[in-house]
Amino acid sequence: MSSTGIDQLRSIEQQFDRESASVGDLRALEDLRNRYLSRKSGLLTAQLQNLRNISAAERAEFGRVANELKTKIENGLSQLLRTIAEREKNAALERERLDITLPGNRRRIGRRHPLTIVRKEMEDIFIAMGYTVEDGPEIESTYYNFDALNISAGHPARDPRDTFFISEDLILRTHTSPVQVRTMEKIKAPVRIICPGRVYRRNAADPTHTPMFHQIECLLVDEGVTFADLKGTLERFHKRFFGEKTKTRLRPAFFPFVEPGAEVDVSCIFCEGSGCRVCKQTGWIELMGAGMVHPNLYGYVDYDREKYAGFAFGGGIDRYSMLKYNINDLQLFLQNDMRFLEQF
């Protein structure tokens, strides 16, 4: 009985060696384990259950051989598990292999709008000269937008064909000058501010006009301020913004809120004053209006017109941006075309 039982164990061992060599995945490994070690139907388990039918003298030898075979099968199964796991890991690494020399999928990084870039640059220039930045409402009363700025009732700027009226007394502001009046109402001289922001006019959209655009205005009020201070400030600003070679000139002009008033030109930044298509061969580009604050304005804010004097000037941020970046169509700033915006 013992000899026959041991022969069966040897046969099981040989069968395990053959079948284990063909195991290729975890499912086949589990089937192999159940075939030999299952508690109910395993081949080796069945032999161990026959141990009670063997005589006591032969039982020790049979038990030793059976235990050795069980240990071999368990070790073989463990080794197969490690081999299959390593093989599957290597296969996964091969499938998921990353070529780090290839360009990655870059996340698109947001950028500041060109008008925001230019506005921030202008603010930085004036802040460095001691000015503060002020803001005000875009829906404005006719008092602050017109009356307090010495713009009479019959002035063309009040025409509904030029201005967006919300009601008889409320409009979308046509310039940022109302911020100057509101600021002077809040604080006493000296005042040194800039007022950047959106403004609105009934313009037909074309390459040089839009119904909504951006302005920046400057106001300085103090004792002893002269026209020379205005010109010096304008020269310093334009040299910082366009470059040290830039020249500034002032030509007489009329604006209701300044006296005297002037149109402000800068030497053409494209031809450096020699004449080109942009400056229409004149060598100069008109950019803003300026002048000494009209004495009538001081009455609206309770300033002593005999004691204080000041200057003010303002221009379009959009216009400065077009010149700085050589852009020929104002509408590009408002179309949200990524091909345009990604250049800045």
Image (spheres, grey):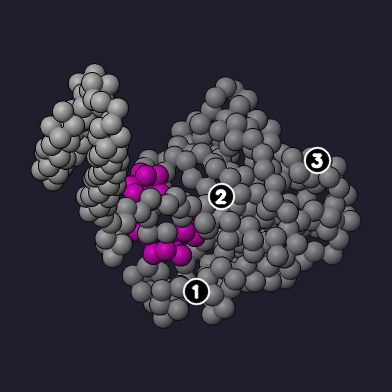
- Of 8 and 209, which appears nearest the observer? 8
Give the residue displayed 70% in from the left and 60% down from the top.
127
Is residue 248 among the parts visible in the rendering? yes
Q: Is residue 255 visible?
A: no
Of labels 1 and 2, the one closer to you: 2
Range shown magenta: 318-338
On the image, the x and y values in percent for residue 118 come to: 52, 58
Q: Is residue 222 left or right of residue 246?
A: right
- Give the mark, 1 or 3, whose residue is nearer the N terminus: 3
Q: CA distance from mark 3 to mark 2?
A: 21 Å
Q: Which mark is residue 185?
A: 3
Q: Which residue is mark 1?
A: 267
Q: Residue at x 52, y 52 (%)?
A: 116
Please state, as top left, top right, bottom left or bottom right, where the C terminus lies in the image.
bottom left
Residue that appears at 21% across and 30% down: 44
Dot 1, crowdedness within 10 Å: few (<14), some or many (≥20)?
A: many
In this rendering, the answer to whether 334 lies above or below 164 is below
Whole-percent x, y for residue 122 in the image? 59, 60
Rendered image quadrant of residue 322: bottom left
Of marks 3 and 2, which one's residue comes earlier in the chain? 3
Q: Cβ–Cβ below 8 Å for labels 1 and 3?
A: no
| Amino acid type, mark 3 | Glu
Amino acid at pointer 2: Gln
- In this view, the residue in front, 298 or 156, is 298
Tell me the residue that label 2 is attached to: 215
For the residues bearing labels 1 and 2, Cβ distance under 8 angstroms = no
Q: Is residue 192 left or right of residue 188?
A: left
* Cα distance between the residues tagged 1 and 3: 37 Å
Secondary structure at badge 3 equals helix
Give 220 or 338, whichever is nearer the viewer: 338
